[in-house]
Amino acid sequence: MKKIILLLLLCSVATAALFANNDNERGYHIEIKLDGYAKDTLFIAYHFGDKQYIKDTLLRQPSGLFVFKGEEKLECGVYLVVMRPDNNYFQILVSDNEQRFSLDCNKDKPTESIKFSSAPDNKLFYEYLNYLGAKRPLADTLRAQIDRMSEEGKKKILQDKLDKLNKEVENYQAEMVTKHAGTLTASIIKANLPFVTPEFDGATEEEKQIKKWRYTRDHYFDNLDVTDPCMLRTPFLFQRIDYFVQKLHVQHPDSISIAVDKVLEKVRPSEETFKFYLIHYLNYYARSNIVGMDAVYVHIVDKYYSTGQAPWTEADQLKKIIDNANTLRPILVGKIAPDIKLQKRDGTPFSLHEVDSEYTILYFWRHDCGHCKKSTPVLKEFYEKFKDKGVKIVAVCAKFTDEVPKCWEYVDEFKLDNWIQAVDPYHRSRFSTIYDLKSTPQIFVLDRKKEILSKKIGAEQLEELMNKIIEMKQKQSHN
């Protein structure tokens, strides 16, 4: 595999220089001089998770400078100096030790022209960016020449040059990390360095792939100190953590829950980072449209929110979160569907668990639901294809008392008598609460044991899903 020069996942930027740091002075004070910038306002933004937020709006001072200041210490990280009207920007570093400095640069070429005063970390950062900026075109040229070259001998010469250039950059990065340990610049460089994966000689190709995947997963954070609170305000932390959860783990609720736990335990020493990711994952899996991922939400609530590990959550909000998890827990994929007592059109009582079938499609609907009117014909077509394969449909009209007769009018209109049609006129079974019916239609796919195989999917997805379920069952029976 060709090596390429590792470039930071940072936009080309230029930053400001700060005032002399003084331990006797509190807060932050950053003076910015922008040559060629005619506007009277400037924005300061910062990275936070996967987004950027405006921190302050600066007005040009009579001196022509823009001053970014505050009485309290500024949270460390990578900040953006954003220029009007096109929102072009360059970046500056703010560390615990570098809160008062000044900078001077040209608005059109900030990276190349920037000069700092009393900001050694920022100066170092831009030395690094300019070094990479000088090496990048050389690497791009060599790669383009290699791609065009057909003669193997000449191609090897070009590749050797590229390898030498890569090695030069790697050595420079290693020297920066070692020589300037403790600076935010060194931490950023190290965080973006790759780790060397063993070749795993003697293994088959398939075994190598598995071993490399496991090694990558186990050593993924070797160079990235996620406990450093400064990393939360960088442009790469969120992407890196998201890749770890979404790409390096099987996308199954159990595996994802383990990945989320690993992340939260790693970032726990940084209180703000822990809070950010705990809230992020709670909300992310609460909103997930992927079948079964609500189990991750329940896991997060049970392990962290129910045990007092989210003390910032207000009492009423915490109660809602826990109540929601308690509602979802019995209807997670893999659970036995809660039994509910219903009645047929003639008043005959029956329960869901009494339905004798290899597969049960539990379908909640309403006669005045627009989406139901679109889903019902699709479900009817599906049933005709699968009724001889052990599939039955239990269709529950989610209407009560005097609206129930309209349910039967709907059944007659769509000619659905060959389904098991059911109602619960006085909601004695509490099925809408038990099955979390915030909207209709809702579909649950159950096996013979009434275990939930899938849920809350569209009627148009049922045929493909059921074919896969039946195919999987046949394979298991043959093994």
Image (tube, rainbow, N blue to C red):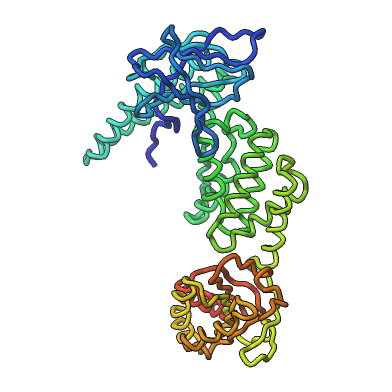
Q: Residue at x 71, y 40 (%)?
A: 312
Is 84 left or right of 275, judged from the image as shown? left
Rendered location of residue 45, percent (x, y): 49, 28
**Viewer-side residue, 77 vs 141:** 77
Quadrant (top left, top right, bottom left, bottom right) of the C terminus:
bottom right
Instruction: Tell me the quarter of the image containing the N terminus.
Output: top left
204 up-or-down from 161: above or below: below
Relative to 50, residue 254 above or below: below
- When the figure is inspected, residue 254 is found, relative to residue 390, above or below; the finding is above
Q: Residue furthest front?
A: 402
Q: Is residue 318 above or below residue 98?
A: below
Question: Is residue 359 shown to the viewer in this render?
Answer: no
- Residue 190 visible in the picture: yes
* Frontmost residue, 320 versus 137: 320
- Residue 383 in percent (x, y) is at 49, 84
* 286 left or right of 193 in image: right
Residue 267 location (% of width, % of height): 65, 37
Using residue 347 as the reference point, say whether residue 11 is left or right of it: left
Query: Which residue is drawn at the image coordinates 40% and 14% (left, top)?
Result: 114
Q: Nearer the viewer, residue 353 or 410?
A: 410
Front-most of residues 347 and 238: 347
Which percent across, then down, holds residue 158? Answer: 28, 32
